[in-house]
Amino acid sequence: MLEQEACSPVSPAMRLLLVEDSQRLQRSLTLGLKQAGYAVDVTGDGRDALWRATTVAYDVIILDIMIPSLDGLEVLKELRQAGKDTHVLLLTAKDAVEDRVKGLQAGADDYLIKPFSFEELLARVQALCRRAYAQKSPEIKLGDLTLNSVKQELLCQGRNVELLPREFRLLQLLFLRRGEVVSRPEIEAHLYDDQTEIMSNVVESTVSLLRKKLVAAGSSTLIQTRRGFGYLVE
C-alpha cells in the first residue's frame, strides 16, 4: 500500500482532458477522477478542447458531443486529421445506433451514453489508459518488481514496498515506458494538471527517494539517469 502524502491523492501516471459543458457534470466528474488519482484538465468549449488536445500529450480525452463553438464530433475529426491518436471516450445523450456509428467512424475509441454510472466511466477510462501503453493487464513485472495499478502497490520479491503517491506515479510512468528514456518535462506533463504549481526539483528529488527505497527493499532493478535526456528502467 501507499503511504499518505499531504495534498496529493493516490494516482496513476495519467493525464486526462475532460470536455463537458454541463457545470454540474463537469464538477462531479472532475472530483471523481481526481479522487481516483488522475491529473485532469477541464474545458466546456469545443475550440478550446481542440487547442488543448493538439498541444498537450493527454493519455485519454473524455469528450461530450453536445458542446459549444465546435461540437464533439468536429473536435474529434479535426484531432484525427491533425494526426493525433489520443484515445477518446465520447459522451452523448443520443442512444440511436446510427449516432454511435458516427462517433466510432469519426475516430472515437469508446462510447458512453448518458446517464451513466461513474464506476463504468472510470473502468472505461482505465482500460483506454492501459491501451494507450499497449498494456492490457493492470500488473507490470520488471525484474524483481511487480507494480499493480489497480491495487496501487509495488512488490519486491513478493514483499510490499511503501511508496508515497508521487513516487508511485513516477515509477508507474517509467514502468509503462520501460526501455525508453522519459524526460523531466514529459514526467511533469503526465503527473500534474495545469492547475498545479510544480517545484523545479520535484522530479529529481522523487527519483532520489525512489532509488533509496528500492535499494532498501533489496531490488536489483534500477532507475537509470541519462544526463541531459531523462530517466529509464529496463
Image: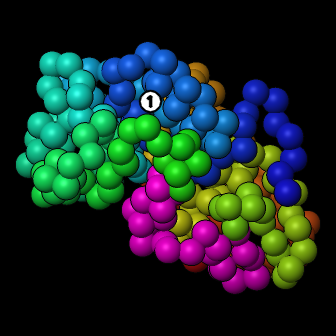
Secondary structure state at the residue bearing disc 1: strand
Say whether residue 156 is magenta: no
Q: Is residue 195 above or below residue 3?
A: above
Left or right relative to 233: residue 152:
right
Report whether residue 153 is seen.
Answer: yes
Q: Quadrant of residue 173?
A: bottom right
Q: Which residues are magenta?
A: 124-147
Q: Position of residue 30 (x, y in %)?
A: 53, 29
Q: Is residue 137 above or below residue 74?
A: below
Left or right relative to 197: residue 177:
left
Report whether residue 191 is seen.
Answer: no
Q: Which of 5 and 230 lies nearest the eye of the viewer?
A: 5
> What residue sits 33% from the left and 56% below the top?
110
Which residue type carries mark 1? Asp
Q: Which of 210 and 14 lies nearest the eye of the viewer?
A: 14
Q: Looking at the image, which residue sits at the far front? A: 96
Q: Is residue 193 above or below residue 221?
A: above
Q: Which of 68 and 167 lies nearest the eye of the viewer?
A: 68
How many numbered tags mark residues here?
A: 1
Q: Position of residue 147 (x, y in %)?
A: 70, 69
Left or right relative to 229: residue 169:
right
Which part of the image, by quadrant, shows the N terminus? bottom right
Residue topped by disc 1? 41
Left or right relative to 138: residue 47:
left
Say whether residue 135 is magenta: yes
> What residue sits 64% from the left and 73% below the top?
139
